[in-house]
Amino acid sequence: MSKYKSGFVTLLGRPNVGKSTLINKLVGKKITITSPIAQTTRNKLRGILTTDDTQMIFIDTPGVHKPHHLLGEKLVKNAISAINGVDLILLIFDSYYKPGRGDEYIRDLLITTKSKCIVVLNKWDLLENRDKFIRMDQYKELLNDNLISFQKVSAFSGYGCNQLTKKIREFLPEGKPLYPKDTIVDQPIKVLLSELIREQVLLNTREEIPHSVAVQIEKIEYKKNKGKEITAILATIIVERKSQKGILIGKGGSMLKVIGKSARINMRNLIEGSIYLELFVKVIPNWRKKESKLIEFGYEEDF
């Protein structure tokens, strides 16, 4: 019988390459938010996959990008800090596109780390067969063909994900499980709930309300009514301008109702019983540039 292995695996890449979607697929449950909008992830979230002989702790990181405000600077620093001291790095690329300058920057970051690395070419199924050989050669040239291996996957469909987990196991150290076997995420419930609400803001408002949104869970109460479990959640959506508040609320509160309804559906994956969600919208001008507000909303630097 093979010996048990466990370890930490950081997913690193540019914004919108599919890191969060891949973690959800590997863990087998939606634990981190996804969106077609770049720079969705803000927290270093740990998703945990436990099998009979392995425990993989995946660390989702914010996309590495050129920051334009204090929040962006903190997110990039946190992403970079997540490559130190882990057992393995999954370097994720969107293989639909040829490598660019942003990919070169991430490659150069890895020169300073001693962690092992697997290159994951995501969205491989979107490429025409005639383009696959060309794209592979382009990424091998970018990386000097000196990393552990190239794995071709589709985080959306699951193509190649079983092969990826087998490859990951090869490079993890022997060791006991670090979390109970039924644990799939290492994050306070308030953080998970706030992220599910923020996801629906991004999905339903798109470019109208970009990345100037934060969500605070003000209160969670667990009640019983006629023997039924009810979880009451009070949350505040923070934006930077009054015009954004109007868009979020919508005519007669219509947009806020859509956001709340969609968020509740995803919350049922985390909470049993009925869910009552009450949402408010608050304007705090330029909160992304204020250190005190970043700390208050949980966006602190990791060291």
Image (cartoon, rainbow, N blue to C red):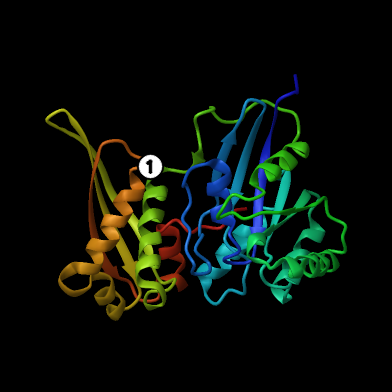
Residue at the outermost top position: 1
| Image position of 188 with respect to 118: above or below | above
| Drawn side of residue 41 relative to residue 56, left or right | left
108 relative to 219, above or below: below
Image quadrant in which you'd find residue 199? bottom left
Asked whether residue 159 is in view, the answer is yes
Q: Left or right of 79: which side holds 98? A: right
Please state the horizontal and vertical placement of residue 286, each as a whole percent of the image.
40, 76
**Residue 41 place in picture, x, y as percent:** 51, 60
Vertical placement of residue 37 versus 274, above or below: below
Where disc 1 sits, the SS reads: loop
Q: Residue at x 16, y 28 (%)?
A: 227
Residue labelled with disc 1: 269
Q: Residue furthest bottom?
A: 243
Residue at image coords 32%, 54%: 263
Position of residue 246 measured from the top left corner of the image (x, y, whole percent): 24, 76
Binning the other alpha carbons within 10 Å of mark 1 as few (below 14), some (14 to 19) or many (20 upward) gives few
* Image quadrant in which you'd find residue 72: bottom right
Whether residue 217 is visible, yes or no, is no
Q: Quadrant of the N terminus?
A: top right
Q: Is residue 156 left or right of residue 199?
A: right
Q: Residue at x 53, y 27 (%)?
A: 180
Dot 1 amino acid type: Asn
Counting every numbered tag in the picture gives: 1
Residue 83, given in percent of the width and then of the height, sits at: 70, 53
Horizontally, residue 5 falls left or right of residue 278, namely: right
The residue furthest front is 129
